[in-house]
Image: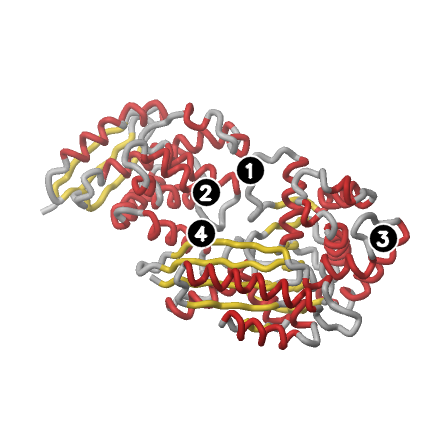
Amino acid sequence: MQRIAIIDIGSNSARLVISHIYKSGAYNMVFNQKESLRLAQKTDSDGNLSREAFDGALRIMQSFAFMCKQYKADKIIAVATAAIRNAKNGSQLTNEVAEKTGIHLHIISGNAEAGLSFLGVINTLPMKDGILFDLGGGSTELVLFRGRKIVESVSIPLGAVNTTSIFNIRDTMPPNVYTDINFFISTRMEKYPWLKDSGLPLIGVGGTARTVAKMIQKSKNYPSSRVHNYIFSAQSFRSLFKKLRGTTLKERSEVPGLSLERADIILAGLSIINCLLELTGSKRIVTSGCGLREGLFYDYYSKTNRVPLIAEDILDSSTENALRLYSVNIEHNRKVAGLALAMFDSWHGLHRLGPRYRELLKTAALLHDIGISINYYSHARHSAYMILNAKIFGLTHAEQMLCAVIAGWHNGISKRYFKNHAYRPLLTEKDWDHAGKLALLLALAESLDYSESDTIQQIAASADPQRAVLEIRATGDPSIELHQLKSNQEWFEETFAIPLKIVVKLLE
């Protein structure tokens, strides 16, 4: 097992993330520490970081170094971004950090920062084309990508912290100042013609983007607290900006979803996003909970584990990671998934669900038994909880909920379990009906390898208006599997309104 620590010293905050990479290739985060730093506000008129900035950064780095030692980190990757990059004495700070903590803090360029943020996004969001903006405290990185490849990128030295300081809008934003800020930001963005009228979705990275998503979620009573892959319209953003533009700091501190530590810099952050929306003509914003730190991790992971830097299919790769992390019998889960998909394909005339549901069934089937790692009894419910909360990428929030329901019902439909679930409103009544059909296919597939002995080698499924037929071809006695299959025949007839006939053929 490898223990990887990633440190990101930004203009507004500092973060330490420690992850484990296991022998199986699976990985997960085991520790996260965030500290407010505000380096962008601690630079003097000559462009030097103040002694206060040095002391604060050193104190935090000593704390991070201690935690890395506690977790026995094998590798520490530490980077500094805009505030230290732009400071005349930034290298002096990194030298002091190395001397007093033993950690080498690397100052990365704006383009490198943009590229790493892109890696964090492209490996966790199902986006082929878009404009990424990583809005930090002292800079905003912009990336145009098409076909999941970077086309253009730039780092603009405007962030939520330094723009707040320039225009002194920590408390309120007078109308005339709003006009000045808009002009100030727009004239700097207009230097990059590839931004203008692209019409592509904006992908927001960083604390400001996540905070905007949280405020909009609260205003709409959104049932999930997850912000990664939360999508909202440009109009929703403009309504929020209009509401907050005339508020005082005290009034903003009471806005649901807006933390007190960000209330004083949010107006500047919103102004930058607003200018970006106007320039690009984008109609929607996709929130990313992953960025620079995840990009640093994927960069390291791809080199040490010999996997592509950009995952070919993020749903497949993230599901595979969860499977390796939690499954007690990976081969059984893969066998069940294959059988479930075979029935899905053969019985399309019965369920009439599109190809996207095939992907959801595959995900649920691969992970349907991971709850055993908690407790075998009620493991279907444990699996549902784990699927709902796992880092599975490439799904909407509703789709992840649907996968959880499919897995949670693979021992039989239990509407009571999800009746009062907080995320229930994510699904429509039609979704619940679809989940029941897919759960049935999963239950049948589970039955076909119930003994986990690989006795049943092949299946052939067919149907006509009078009945469905499931022919199973076995290398040994499939009595255990047959018993389980027969217990699901009534469920099959209730769902599809025709009986299920089971035919057994023994293979020599």
Q: Which mark is residue 389?
A: 2
Q: Disc 2 to disc 3, how far (Cα)?
A: 40 Å
Q: Which residue is mark 4?
A: 315
Residue at image coords 25%, 46%: 332
Is there a contact, CB below 8 Å, between mark 2 and mark 1? no
Q: Earlier in the sequence, mark 3 or mark 1?
A: 3
Mark 1: secondary structure: loop
Tell me the amino acid under the disc marked 3. Tyr
Report the mark closest to the observer, 4 or 3: 3
Q: Amino acid at mark 2?
A: Asn
Query: Is 324 or 176 nearer to us in this picture?
Result: 176
Q: Give the labeled residue for mark 1.
A: 224
Residue on which disc 3 sits: 178
The answer to whether the residue labelled 3 contacts the one labelled 1, judged by CB atoms less than 8 Å apart, is no
Residue type, mark 1 in image: Ser
Q: Are marks 2 and 3 in contact (CB under 8 Å)?
A: no
**Residue 282 visible in rendering:** yes
Q: Picture coordinates of residue 355 (x, y %)?
A: 44, 44
Residue 223: percent from left, percent from top: 57, 34
CA–CA distance in space, label 3 to label 1: 33 Å
